[in-house]
C-alpha cells in the first residue's frame, strides 16, 4: 500500500487518527456540518429505507438518517475506528429511538449484516480505501440492484480556500510535499473523472456529480484563530508534517496559521473560509 505525505492508511483511522477525531469531535463535526447537512438534504431519505452510513465517525449523520427513515427503516453506521464506534453507540442511545446500530468494520472489505441494503451514504468516508477499485466493488455488494449511493467528497484543494490557506502556511515552513493525488487521503476523489471511473467499474450507473460550496468554520464553530491554529496543528494533515519538527518550528507554524485565519474570523461563528465538495449520487446496476 502506498501513500502520499497527506495520505492516510486505513490503520491510521483504526488507531491514532480515530482517537484524535474522537477527542476533537465537536470541532470536526461543526467544521464539516454545512456539507453534511447538504448531503442529507440531497439524499432525501424516506421512511422504511434501510441505509448504511460509511465512515460514520461520531455517528451524527447515522442518527439523523435513523430519524429520517423511521418508522420502518434502519440506519447502520460503519467505521474502522473502535473508539468512534463505541462513542457513536453511546450517543445513539441518548439521542434517538430510531432503529440505529453501529458496526466496527472496514467498509472496503467487510460484509455487513443485513446486506444488501436500500441505500449507502458517506460524508467524507470513502476517500481512504487503500485499494479504491476493490473498495467500491465492496460497496456495490452492500446494495440491492437499483439501490442508491450518496457521497460527499472534497473538490480539488485549489478550489477549497480553507485547505489552501493551511497549505500555504505549511509550505512556507516545511516546503511543498510531493503527493500522489489518488493516494488514500482527503482529496483522493477530487477528480470527478476518476470518481466516475471507480463507480462505473464497480457496476454503478446514473451517476450525477453536483458541486456544493459553502463557508466552513475552520477549527469548529466559534473557534478563535488561535484555537483553530492549535487544532489544525494537532488534528489535520499538518500534524503528520509536524511530527518530527522542533517545538520552535511547530509554534511558528501555529502563530502563522492564527495570523492567516484572523482576517476570516467572525465573532461567535468562527473562522469562515470557503469549502467545496462534490455531492455524488449513483445507482447500483
Image (cartoon, rainbow, N blue to C red):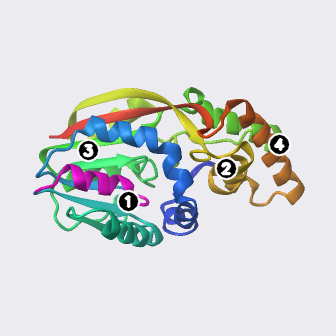
Highlighted magenta segment, given as a residue range? 55-71
Q: Nearer the viewer, mark 3 or mark 4?
A: 4
Percent of width and height locating residue 275: 53, 32
Percent of width and height locating residue 255: 82, 45
Q: Is residue 168 above or below residue 22?
A: above
Residue under label 1, please give it: 59
Q: Are marks 1 and 3 in contact (CB under 8 Å)?
A: no
Mark 3 or mark 2, earlier in chain: 3
- The alpha-carbon separation of the residues under discs 2 and 4 comes to 15 Å
Crowd band around label 4 with a 10 angstrom C-alpha radius: few (<14), some (14–19), many (20+): few
Q: Nearer the viewer, mark 1 or mark 3?
A: 1
Residue under label 4, please give it: 173
Residue under label 3, please give it: 202
Percent of width and height locating residue 34: 44, 38
Crowd band around label 2 with a 10 angstrom C-alpha radius: few (<14), some (14–19), many (20+): some
Q: Is residue 63 magenta?
A: yes
Amino acid at each position: 500500500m502506498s501513500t502520499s505525505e497527506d495520505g492516510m492508511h486505513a490503520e491510521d483511522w483504526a488507531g491514532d487518527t480515530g482517537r484524535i477525531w474522537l477527542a476533537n469531535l465537536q470541532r470536526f463535526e461543526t467544521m464539516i456540518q454545512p456539507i453534511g447537512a447538504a448531503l442529507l438534504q440531497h439524499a432525501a431519505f424516506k421512511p422504511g429505507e434501510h441505509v448504511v452510513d460509511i465512515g460514520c465517525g461520531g455517528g451524527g449523520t447515522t442518527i439523523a438518517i435513523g430519524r429520517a427513515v423511521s418508522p420502518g427503516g434502519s440506519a447502520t453506521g460503519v467505521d474502522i475506528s473502535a473508539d468512534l464506534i463505541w462513542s457513536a453507540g453511546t450517543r445513539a442511545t441518548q439521542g434517538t429511538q430510531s432503529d440505529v446500530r453501529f458496526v466496527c468494520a472496514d467498509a472496503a472489505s467487510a460484509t455487513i449484516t443485513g446486506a444488501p441494503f436500500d441505500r449507502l451514504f458517506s460524508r467524507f468516508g470513502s476517500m481512504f480505501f487503500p485499494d479504491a477499485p476493490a473498495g467500491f466493488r465492496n460497496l456495490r455488494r452492500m446494495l440491492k440492484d437499483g439501490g442508491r449511493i450518496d457521497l460527499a467528497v472534497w473538490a480539488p484543494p485549489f478550489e477549497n480556500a480553507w485547505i489552501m490557506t493551511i497549505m500555504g502556511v505549511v509550505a512556507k515552513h516545511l516546503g511543498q510535499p510531493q503527493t500522489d493525488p489518488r493516494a488514500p487521503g482527503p482529496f483522493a476523489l477530487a477528480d470527478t473523472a476518476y470518481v466516475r471511473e471507480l463507480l462505473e467499474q464497480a457496476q454503478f450507473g446514473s451517476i450525477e456529480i453536483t458541486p456544493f460550496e459553502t463557508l466552513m468554520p475552520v477549527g469548529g464553530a466559534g473557534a478563535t484563530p488561535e484555537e483553530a491554529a492549535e487544532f489544525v496543528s494537532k488534528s489535520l494533515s499538518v500534524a503528520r508534517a509536524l511530527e518530527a519538527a522542533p517545538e520552535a518550528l511547530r509554534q511558528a507554524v501555529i502563530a502563522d496559521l492564527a495570523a492567516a485565519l484572523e482576517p476570516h474570523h467572525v465573532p461567535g461563528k468562527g473562522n469562515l473560509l470557503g469549502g467545496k465538495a462534490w455531492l455524488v449520487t449513483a445507482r447500483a446496476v
